[in-house]
Amino acid sequence: MSITQQDVDRIARLASLELTSQQSESIQSDFSDILALIQQLQSVDTQGVEPMAHPLCGQQDVALRLRDDVARPAATTEQRDALMANAPATADGLFLVPTVIE
Amino acid sequence: MSDAPLHTQFNSIAQLREALVSRQVSAQELAQSALDAIQARADLNAFLHVDATLSLEQARDADRLLADGNAPALAGVPIGHKDLFVTQGWRTTAASKMLADYVSPFDATVVAQLRQAGAVSLGKLNCDEFGMGSSNEKSAFGPVKNPWNTATNPGGSSGGSAAAVAAGLLMGATATDTGGSIRRPAAMCGVSGIKPTYGTVSRYGVIANGSSLDQAGPIARSALDLLELLDPITAFDAADATSLEHCNGTPNQPGRVRHDFDRAVQAHQAAGSTPLKGLRIGVPDEFFSADIQPDVAATIDAALKQYESLGAERVRISLPRTSMSVPVYYVIGPAESSSNLSRFDGVRYGYRTAQYNDLDEMISRSRAEGFGSEVIRRIMVGTYVLSHGYYDAYYLQAQRLRRLIADDFRRALTEQCDVIMGPVAPTVAGDLGTEGSPTEEWTADIFTISANLAGLPAMSIPCGFASKRNLPVGLQLIGNYFCEGQLLAIAHAYQNVTDWHQRKPEQQ
């Protein structure tokens, strides 16, 4: 089992990865091995088995909590600046990105 | 060559605490000597960020509390944090170029809890990028070397945590385990590590890899030291949506693990010369498959014999879907990773490419340049198995098999045995730079990933050496849900009569 270069391009687009041709070729060659590995899953009959999303769901109640729907205090300007200190480009408390709408 | 750090004169955190409380040694002296040793062992590449000013400030705080006579339990104990835990002050990179300059505005809950308990952080520890790897060779900042033989890798992904403890640079370290990332490096470096039950330790501020698998836990020299580090961080945290409020009806809070440990140890002591009489150890046939190195299997067998001499009974069990855990994991893990890592877009934080024409190009070029090859591989696999037309065949099928794998464990641990034991890995540490193909690397996780799929607590303790080069072997212990205290007590019973956990590598 293998995938085509078009398949790799499509997955990379879905994953927002602009792969170089070298990265792309290496992924394509890895994928034949990887697909052979994960295709072993098909060999097991799992009819009637409920998919398990949470590892403790057979053990105790694992319903996700919701917090109370109340407003939390707004961040101060200092807190905002601390959060935004890691951004590659900012101005006046805003994240800068290339023009989206002309 | 520098002197060994002061804390290495003490065999346990408890001993060190006595010396600190009686003021025979100060937290600042300890921190300074550890900082010196870390610098002297820069060749190991175990640390990604050290900041003496920050560490000494924490040590000063600890000394002040100790002088006042009401110091918390870990006051002055030198530890480090895997670089997936966000920290104020120290950079948090996840060992990725994507986050090379990232400084968190807050501490992860576990970091804050250990700080609250008085522990002094000596810095941030190298690991595989975003925790994706089994040898610590997938770090964007270079591999970590194994202190037992610097030509070999330390295991991964928490390789920096395990190597730093093994080299005596720290008393303990935080780590995370998505598919074996605490147990594997602990085994390869001859130290002890525990991955507690899923949901018991907060993941708030731990950079996410696979959210239904990730669990934080400590690495240290012995089961006793693991208890000191695990108990204060085992607690419900409202900031982590998967954090458990209760563990089988008992509140998830500090004291729970220690209570279970103390009770188990008391029972062991009451049993005299056969402390583990009545303990049934399940040994899965599948963990001794043809792939295991014969001398690793022999070392594990010797450890099991030691357990039998303590009164335990060895029971043959079967976990028939063990081989299937690899494909199940490498569908679910990458699916979750690809979702989690979609947050890295070069807008709010992280690496941004130098040249681009529009927003899409900026994001996808930043991601392709910022992530390393293993991370890109897993994002691609995850995106593929979640994509239209493949979701049922891969992701849902893997989740169904995950339930069957968890059911196998449940059956064994309720009907046949009290604890499961076997090897952590089929081999000892491998040479640096000799990694196999991606799927060969993934398959090496075969004995560890099923505990993550089932959410069970599991640990590794050193049990001997194997191969021509005499490298450490780790014994794996897997317990029932929430049995961290019992597991640590069973490990402690072994460490009471063996000294593998006290062996230290000679400096090379």
Image (cartoon, rainbow, N blue to C red):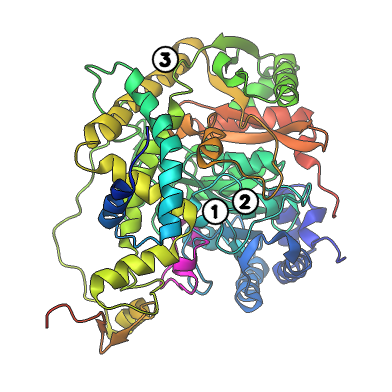
Which image quarter holds the C terminus of chain B? bottom right
Q: Is residue B240 visible?
A: no
**Residue type at numbered disc 3:** Arg
**Residue type at numbered disc 2:** Gly
Circle 1 Cα neighbour tier, 10 Å, few/some/many (<14 / 14–19 / ≥20): many
Residue matched to label 3: B411
Q: Where is residue B468 in the image (x, y as percent from the top left)?
A: 83, 34
Q: Is residue B99 magenta?
A: yes
Residue for point 41% across, 59% down? A21
Chain of the residue that carries numbered disc 2 in the rendered image: B
Circle 2 Cα neighbour tier, 10 Å, few/some/many (<14 / 14–19 / ≥20): many
Q: In the shown orientation, is residue B247 left or right of residue B503?
A: left
Q: Is residue A20 magenta?
A: no
Residue matched to label 1: B128
Residue for point 32% across, 65% down? B364
Tag shown at residue A12: none
Say if mark 2 contacts mark 1, CB within 8 Å.
yes
Residue matched to label 2: B159
Q: Distance between the residues labelled 3 and 2?
A: 33 Å
**Mark 2 element type:** helix
- Above or below for B372 versus B68: above
Q: Position of residue B99 (x, y in %)?
A: 45, 68
